[in-house]
Image: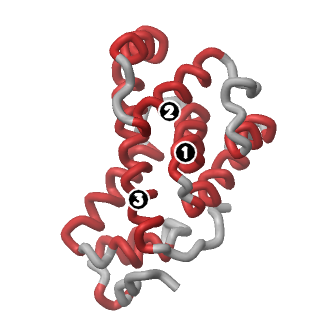
Amino acid sequence: MALIPYADESDWPAEVRERATELPIGNLIGMLANAPALVGPTLRLGGAILTESKLDPVLRELAILRVAALTGSEYEWVQHAAIARMLEIDDDKVKALEADSVREGPFDGRESLVLEIVEEAVGGTPGRELVQRAERELGRTETVELILTVGYYSMLGCLMRATEIELDEPAS
């Protein structure tokens, strides 16, 4: 049972009730809805990251899974491992992230760069040279989107862990 009760669905803002039918993350929405002024903007940002970002979806999902692994966010892991399967990300890569075998894992240069940024961002601030290298290799927009993605999923993971929300069925 979550440490803080989920908001009653009848109290959710209309925008959130509409979005909830599109997303398999009921417990997360129920917890976010306890902050009515923030739930809509939070979901809109997440939606933009997942559907409007220029960052390659494979790189995005590897980054999110690495955030989940580094921060112990089981809820994020379960949801995004399912998304990784839908994107046909190699199981060896997902297993390497789960086993914390990133350095020895089957990642190409761009993937390794993304995972290095995630590690540094979750632990503090990515180094100057690393960010400049990312801009050269990924592009300016994609680098900024990557850093925002790491921050967003770190924030959600903090909420999930702090409130001990229960797992929902993964996306399918």
Q: Which of disc 2 and disc 1 is earlier in sequence?
A: 1
Q: Residue 20, located in which quarter of the rendered image? A: bottom left
Q: Nearer the viewer, residue 65 or 87?
A: 65
Say whether marks 1 and 2 touch (CB < 8 Å): yes
Q: Which of disc 3 and disc 2 is earlier in sequence?
A: 2
Give the distance between the C-alpha atoms of the residues marked 2 and 3, in whole angstroms: 16 Å
Q: Which of disc 3 and disc 1 is earlier in sequence?
A: 1
Number of callouts:
3
Residue designated by label 3 = 158
Q: Is residue 42 shown left or right of residue 57?
A: left
Q: Residue at x 54, y 37 (%)?
A: 63
**Residue furthest front as drawn:** 123
Q: Residue at x 44, y 16 (%)?
A: 134
Q: Is residue 74 shown left or right of residue 129?
A: right
Q: Nearer the viewer, residue 150 or 122?
A: 122
Where disc 2 sits, the SS reads: helix
Q: Residue 141, located in which quarter of the rendered image? A: top left
Query: Which residue type does callout 3 highlight?
Result: Cys
Counting from the top left corner in percent of width and height, residue 110 is at 58, 18
Residue designated by label 1 = 70
Query: Which residue type does callout 1 highlight?
Result: Leu
Q: Nearer the viewer, residue 2 or 58?
A: 2
For disc 3, the neighbor class at 10 Å (few under 14, some 14 to 19, many from 20) is some
**Residue furthest right as drawn:** 92
In the depicted structure, whether residue 93 falls above or below residue 103: below
Mark carried by residue 46 = none
Residue designated by label 2 = 119
Give the distance between the C-alpha atoms of the residues marked 1 and 3, in whole angstroms: 12 Å
In the depicted structure, whether residue 36 falls above or below residue 123: below
Query: Which residue type does callout 2 highlight?
Result: Glu
In the depicted structure, whether residue 33 falls above or below residue 143: below
